[in-house]
Image (cartoon, rainbow, N blue to C red):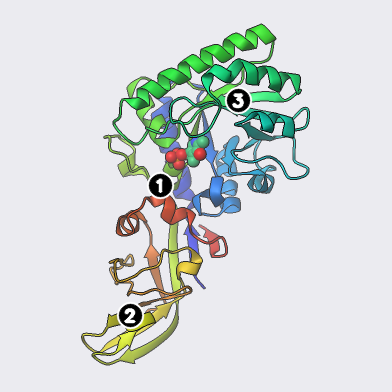
Amino acid sequence: MAEIILDSKAYKHNLNLISSHIGSHSSPNVELAAVLKDNAYGHGLNEIASIAAEYGIKSVFVKNHNEAIQVCELFPQVTALYGMPQGDFAKNIAFVIHDKEHISALPKGTKVELKVNAGMNRNGIQPSELQSFIKDILQKGLELIGVFSHNGYGDDLDSAFFDTQSNFALIKQEVLHLSQKYGFAPPRFHSLSTSGAIRVASESGITDDLVRIGIGAYGYLDVSFKNPISAKLQKVASLYADRVSTRFLHKGERIGYSGCTTLESPQVISTYDIGYGDGFFRVSEHHKVHTTNGLQILPRSSMDCFSCFCDEPRICVFKDVSELAKAFGTISYEILTHLSPSIKRTII
Ligand SMILES: *Cc1c(COP(=O)(O)O)cnc(C)c1O
């Protein structure tokens, strides 16, 4: 049966690496929060949560209420980035306010984080709406534990990155002013994901209270700027597929749907139990994709299997998805998040 092996040492190594890079350049109290959304980037929410908790992570970010309830006993603070609760929820789950209707949807006493648009123009309220939202949050009796934004320019050497950071600095000032005016405790401030955190730590030092580390912890950081981290990260997930069947075919025989691959010589060929139904992108005649040992994954792959010229009982489909991402014209995040939750996960 196909299997994803999760290297817990690699995850912890990556957090140590990022933490020491950030810590040596920033105020000493920047908290490292783990982003576990979307089934921990396809790695497996419960598995990565257990490793993160063992490491000592205190705050995590998940996609929604459903993910939050799966991990809320492992961490003091869990934030659901999207959506409102469906039914009861634990006290340590915070929900994100993007809109006034979210304020009315939540019961009194609920922890919330307010998302503010600092220049990415994707989610969050406008900075000019801060006072109005904060007044409503207080009036509703919600507990404002955080104010945050997301910098959409962290991966590129685009000056818009710094404009976004300056906008967030103004947002912080305004919130601190309002906290004095209305007498609520200053919330935690955060604006940086992996790439931005690495970059700001190298350049000016991080002044936020917390950074939200996703992709870097899983071992990837594909950015266009030079940094001391990318080359030292270790990949956490590797995917293995097991043989379903083996046969010997003659020259000229064709394999799979539409007979897409034609044998140029007699070959031993086997199928392995990973297909696009398992979230592994469909390999067609437009892609040239190889396993870790350099065997071509022959087009076209099927819903539940692919073929290779070999007869090994088990093959490693990837230890690193960077090449696959290139072959499919996408980014490592997308290859990873697609991995089906039903593939067996084993932590080593
Ligand atoms: C996904 C996400 C992150 C993590 O980004 P990485 O590039 O994976 O580090 C941080 N913050 C928010 C709001 C996100 O949605």
Q: Is residue 255 above or below residue 145?
A: below
Q: Amino acid at mark 2?
A: Cys
Q: Is residue 120 left or right of residue 288?
A: right
| Residue assigned mark 3 | 146
Q: Is residue 71 left or right of residue 87?
A: left
Residue at (55, 44) in percent of width and height:
36
Residue at (73, 34) in percent of width and height:
105
- Residue 169's disc number: none
| Image coordinates for residue 35, horizontal then vertical, percent | 53, 41
Q: How many marks?
A: 3
| Residue assigned mark 1 | 219
The nearer-to-camera label among 2 and 3 is 3
Q: Amino acid at mark 3?
A: Gly
Q: Give whichever of 149, 250 is nearer the camera.
A: 149
Residue 148, quarter of the rendered image = top right
Residue farthest left in this picture: 264
The nearer-to-camera label among 3 and 1 is 3
| Image coordinates for residue 337, horizontal then vertical, percent | 48, 53
**Gap in Å between the C-alphas at discs 3 and 1?**
27 Å
Residue at (48, 43) in percent of width and height:
12
**Gap in Å between the C-alphas at discs 2 and 3?**
54 Å
* Earlier-in-chain disc, 2 versus 1: 1
Residue 145, quarter of the rendered image = top right
| Image coordinates for residue 143, horizontal then vertical, percent | 71, 24
**Gap in Å between the C-alphas at discs 2 and 1?**
30 Å
- Mark 1 element type: loop
Asked if the residues shown at circle 2 and circle 1 are in contact, with their CB atoms under 8 angstroms apart, the answer is no
| Residue assigned mark 2 | 310
* Earlier-in-chain disc, 2 versus 3: 3
- Mark 3 element type: strand
